[in-house]
Amino acid sequence: MTRRPSFPARIDFSHGQPTAARPAGAGSKAAPRAGAAARAPVGPQGLGMDSVAVRASMVQKLAAQGVADKWVLQAMNAVERHRFVDPALVNQAYEDTSLPIGLGQTISKPNVVARMMELLRHGQPGKLGRVLEIGTGCGYQAAVLSHLATEVYSIERLRGLHDKARDNLRPFRLANVHLLFGDGMAGFPKGAPYAAIIAAAGGEALPQPWLEQLAVGGRLVAPMVTAAGQQALVVVDKTAQGLQQTVLEAVHFVPLKSGIA
Ligand code: SAH
């Protein structure tokens, strides 16, 4: 495996001290653990520290933009996003922008990841149970989810990205992340029922298997092309009475495709 180069010196480190990053109910017993990501080896001469500061600044911006869930903020603070992007893009890793991850796919901007995580958790007091993610991509969101769920099953249809995510995630040793290669439109019945399902790619409709594999009381968050012909974020709650769908803001995700490649 090729290791990522250390954090580049050209990033702007004038964002204050890493101690500014105390978003998660600090001191609370229910607060999630910082995770292995926060303890990952640092680069030479304090560059690792600077990645902490830049990430803290990203999290502060997320909070200022309205992300209020402390679990989500802590998870975004814990995962080193710069380790998931191409070395040439590392200095943009903490900007609120989507970035290419190869094979024509993109990693969502931090604000969108945080927003979806918040919708998925919808204020739950503790961790989610088993979560299914469709579209592993580079593995970043799976790493964030690993802090918010007991188990994460993440499916990718492109072999190249599935392998890349495996390489990216290996150093973090996230024992609760299970990477699967296959067509996520079929879900992953073996892990069902899921407390939550999240898709990082949007189709014309929500595949039936996702709705079937969602637990009663569970929530699905996915981009979908709506009646207006635009892609929007859709939330589906599965209740004892049936499915309840809410269409939220417009989004721009890569298309959900069938089959593997
Ligand atoms: N969560 C990812 C975002 C990846 S972009 C990250 O953090 O990097 C969305 C991904 O969905 C792409 O990698 C694309 O290949 C994948 N995808 C699209 N349709 C799919 C399907 N039917 N099954 C599994 N993955 C799919």
Image (cartoon, rainbow, N blue to C red):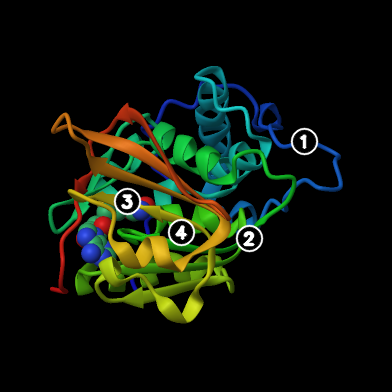
Three-letter code for the amino acid on which mark 4 is drawn: Ala
Q: Are marks 4 and 2 in contact (CB under 8 Å)?
A: no
Horizontal relation, residue 7 to residue 61: left or right: left
Q: Position of residue 255 (x, y in %)?
A: 17, 50
Residue at x 54% of width, y 21% of height: 66
Q: Amino acid at mark 1?
A: Gly
Dot placed on the residue nearer the N-terminal end, 2 or 3: 2
Q: Nearer the viewer, residue 111 or 196?
A: 196
Q: Nearer the viewer, mark 2 or mark 3?
A: 3
- Mark 4 or mark 3, which is nearer the start of the sequence? 4
CA distance for labels 2 and 3 = 24 Å
Ligand 1 closer than 8 Å to label 2 CB: no
Q: How far is mark 3 from mark 4, CA to CA?
A: 11 Å
Q: Residues within 10 Å of mark 4 (few under 14, many from 20)?
A: many
Q: Which residue is mark 4?
A: 142
Upstream in sequence: badge 1 or badge 3: 1
Label 1 element class: loop
- Is residue 3 visible in the rendered structure shown here? no
Q: Is residue 132 visible?
A: yes
Identified at 18% across, 56% down, the residue is 102
**Ligand 1 within 8 Å of the CB at mark 4:** yes
Q: Secondary structure at mark 4?
A: helix
- N-terminal of the pair, mark 2 or mark 1, is 1
Q: Residue at x 28, y 54 (%)?
A: 206
Label disc, if present, on residue 25 of the rendered structure = 1
